[in-house]
Image (cartoon, rainbow, N blue to C red):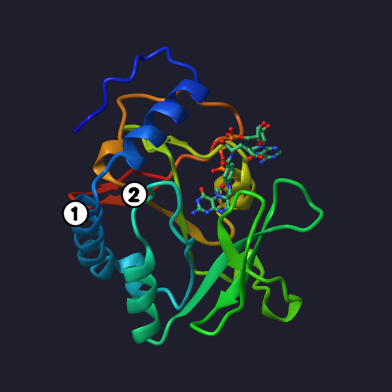
Amino acid sequence: MRSAVHPLASRQHIRQEIRQRRRALSQKQQKHDAEELLIRFQQLPCVINANHIALYLSNDGEIDTQPLIDWLWQQGKSVYQPVLHPFSKGHLLFLHYTPNTRMKLNKYQIREPILDIRLVKPVNELDLVCTPLVAFDNTGQRLGMGGGYYDRTLNRWHNERLGPQPLGLAHDCQQVDSLPFEAWDVPLPEIITPSYHFTWPV
Ligand SMILES: Nc1nc2c(c(=O)[nH]1)N(C=O)[C@@H](CNc1ccc(C(=O)N[C@@H](CCC(=O)O)C(=O)O)cc1)CN2
Ligand SMILES: Nc1ncnc2c1ncn2[C@@H]1O[C@H](COP(=O)(O)OP(=O)(O)OP(=O)(O)O)[C@@H](O)[C@H]1O
């Protein structure tokens, strides 16, 4: 379902509306969406060809990424989790993540690995960055939670095509017709939802 968000609605308004829509999905719908997403994910060349993959833990009604993580582990691939940088505001670190990783809640109450610099993977050594989003439009523009974390992470890929490619993950109900965007926003080349694989030329 495409959204009926007003074309001139502010970023904050769209964020609130789509977050609310995402949180309102039933457990049954969430489970169905996660199963469909996994099937699509398993077939993507950008996933099959990657060995070092960043993936976040779902929060706030986001589509469940745990089945993707479990499958990547089964495939022998390495998974990395975003961790809020301890002093560089608005930046993320990516830490190697295994079933034994010790976790804590960050300031947004999202689970993240306890910081251990031995586990940090430089972003340019990742092959793929699975990217959370609140809303996306039919050109691949993305609106996130509002911290600019992924815009900063993907900045070099966007400007110089250096570093890992992003892959957006979302429920179908997070699609809107068009999003207002700012200079720093990084549009995504590829997004998967339970029922569609979107690609845009880069
Ligand atoms: N699952 C997941 N992990 C993620 C992200 C994400 O979008 N999803 N992020 C993607 O960037 C980063 C966290 N970004 C976030 C930015 C703002 C808020 C948030 O809830 N803000 C509050 C108010 C701010 C506050 O409490 O200080 C709000 O909007 O109500 C949460 C996460 C890193 N980890
Ligand atoms: N590459 C960048 N360099 C400096 N500041 C940036 C950059 N990207 C974003 N910002 C800043 O981050 C703030 C939040 O940006 P925005 O609202 O677009 O976040 P978002 O895309 O919704 O969140 P996220 O990327 O964390 O999911 C903005 O005030 C913006 O100035």
Q: Secondary structure at mark 1?
A: helix
The residue singled out by tag 1 in the image is: 28
Residue at point 76% right, 47% down?
89
Q: Secondary structure at mark 2?
A: strand
Quick one: label 2, few (<14), some, or many (20+) residues within 10 Å?
many
The residue singled out by tag 2 in the image is: 191
**Is residue 37 shown left or right of residue 75?**
left
User: Would you place residue 142 above or below residue 45 in this image?
Assistant: above
**Is residue 72 shown left or right of residue 85?**
left
Task: State the residue in front, 141 or 118.
Answer: 118
Q: Position of residue 192 (x, y in %)?
A: 29, 52
Task: State the residue in front, 186 or 168.
Answer: 168
Q: Position of residue 161 (x, y in %)?
A: 55, 53
Residue at point 30% right, 39% down?
24
Q: Quadrant of the C terminus?
A: top left
Q: Quadrant of the N terminus?
A: top left
Task: Tell me how far mark 2 sits from mark 1, CA to CA.
Answer: 23 Å
